[in-house]
Image (tube, grey):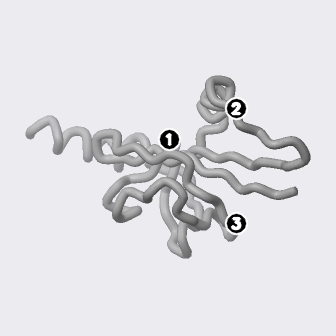
Amino acid sequence: MELKELVMEDIEGSFLNPKEFGEVHMVNGLEMLIIMDGNEMIEREKRTSNHVEGTFRKQILFFVAAKDFGALPAIGREISVDGKKYRVTDAVFEGGMYSISAEAMRS
């Protein structure tokens, strides 16, 4: 096997496996196995903060298999996670997976 094949096997067999890290969520109206990462989101928020006074900002960070999600979402694109709308603030391709950060702004 080549390295790319091994990585894809690990994504499905380990990282996104519901018995390991993966959780089923509704993303853009489709059930997908993703990994929600609240700890990493907190660390990223410490490095960049542009909070506006008087607003509440819900931020999420999740990892999803690129083949399940489709095209890498553009920054600013609206996505839906578990029925709630978010705006993509960062999206990175990481070896077969996407790391997607998004936020919902409410006042």
Residue labelled with disc 1: 20
Q: Image check: 34 left or right of 69? A: right
Can residue 15 be seen here? yes
Tell us which disc is closer to us: 3 or 2.
Answer: 2
**Label 3 vs 1, first from the N-terminus:** 1
Name the amino acid, label 2.
Ser
Residue labelled with disc 3: 84
Is the residue 35 above or below the residue 28 in the image? above
The residue carrying pointer 3 sits among few (fewer than 14), some (14 to 19) or many (20 or more) residues within 10 Å by Cα, namely: few
Is the residue 107 above or below the residue 6 in the image? below
Whole-percent x and y of residue 1? 8, 40
Label 1: state its secondary structure. Answer: loop
Q: Residue at x 44, y 57 (%)?
A: 74
Q: Are marks 3 and 2 in contact (CB under 8 Å)?
A: no
Q: Image check: 91 left or right of 101? A: left
Gap between marks 3 and 2, in whole Å? 22 Å
Gap between marks 1 and 2, in whole Å? 32 Å
Whole-percent x and y of residue 93? 34, 45
Can residue 39 be seen here? no
Q: Which mark is residue 49?
A: 2
Label 3: state its secondary structure. Answer: strand
The residue carrying pointer 2 sits among few (fewer than 14), some (14 to 19) or many (20 or more) residues within 10 Å by Cα, namely: few
- Which quarter of the picture shows residue 106? bottom right
